[in-house]
Amino acid sequence: MNGTQKRILPVIALLLAALSGYWLLFGADNSPVNLPGAQMSEPGREFMDISVYYVKFTDKDACLAREVHQVPFTNDGPQAAVKELIAGNPRTEGAAKVLPAGTRLLGININADGLATVNFSGEVLNANVGASGEILGIQSIVNTLTEFPQIKGVSFQVNGQLDRRTMDWWGHVGLYEQPFRRNLEQVNEPAVWVTHPVENQTAGVPLLVKGSALVPGGSVTARLLDENGKKIAEGTADGPQRAPVRGEFEIRLTFNPPGKGKGTLEVFPAGKGGSPQDIVKIPIQWP
């Protein structure tokens, strides 16, 4: 091997290493790859919205309340959501955190079938709640995680184990029937929420409106307003006509876009005319 070849070979090795790192991070089609445990930043985006569920206790009963919280942007949404359940503060009157202070999230593993196994530190077992608090507390975590479409069920571990003490959990219901599935039957607040479209989304034609409602009869109305507050489209999704029962709804609004600019989507229980306490307002943009 001559001197020139000796000088070229290290350069080639460095180039191959750089290319390998590029392919690892971005893939062959130049699209970003989310590595396990990696948190890749998105230019210009500092925060993200996540949905969390808290337990609400009243003099008569207990239920779940869904809230949307803003957290620092991360590619690991499920971990961010559980950490918010631990450290965040509920805004709904009467709602409370159930996970004990000092609880640490040690990891979440999601398999190919959509089962998320959540590993907590030992402090999670220190909760002092009744049977209803245990059931709703477990469901609050499950519903929070199943907001992410890749998660279909949830199981729990403590310090990586599922021993007898862990199986007893908080002493009433336990983890004997896990994995747990999503269940919104005891989510009483808010009455209506919208999952599509999101704020400031460009409205396609027809505009698909999706969400969940707990209202008498289950019927929900969606109306589209231009930037001057003029109604340009309206539609209603009929419910099962038994009250009250929570269910998902879909409405498609056909409209003529008024030109570049912004508008507002309003969603509310049918028959209430958009009462301020029930109405959901989402700013959108025209295509």
Image (spheres, rainbow, N blue to C red):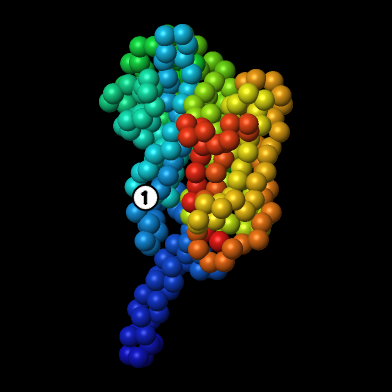
- Looking at the figure, which quarter contains the N terminus? bottom left
Camera-nearest residue between 63 and 155: 63
Residue 158 left/right relative to 183? left
Quadrant position of residue 171: top left
Using residue 245 as the reference point, say whether residue 61 is left or right of it: left
For label 1, the SS is strand
Give the x, y percent position of residue 65: 46, 26
Front-most of residues 229 and 41: 229
Q: Residue at x 39, y 11 (%)?
A: 129
Q: Quadrant of residue 251?
A: top right
Q: Is residue 75 shown to the viewer in this render?
A: yes
- Decide if residue 161 is in sight here: no
| Spot occupied by residue 234 in the image (x, y as percentages of width and height) | 65, 46
| Percent position of residue 35, x then y | 45, 53
Q: Is residue 5 left or right of residue 116?
A: left
- Nearer-the-camera pick, 63 or 103: 63
Note whether 258 is above or below 238 in the view shown.
below
- The C terminus lies in which quarter of the figure? bottom right
> In the displayed structure, would residue 275 be above or below residue 263?
above
In the foreground, 272 or 112: 272
According to the picture, the residue beneath numbered tag 1 turns out to be 47
* x and y percentages locating residue 114 in the rendered image: 58, 38
Residue at image coords 37%, 85% = 8
Residue depicted at 40% across the width and 79% down the height:
12
Residue drawn at (35%, 11%), measured in percent from left and top? 128
Q: Amino acid at mark 1?
A: Phe
* Count of marks overlaid on the render: 1
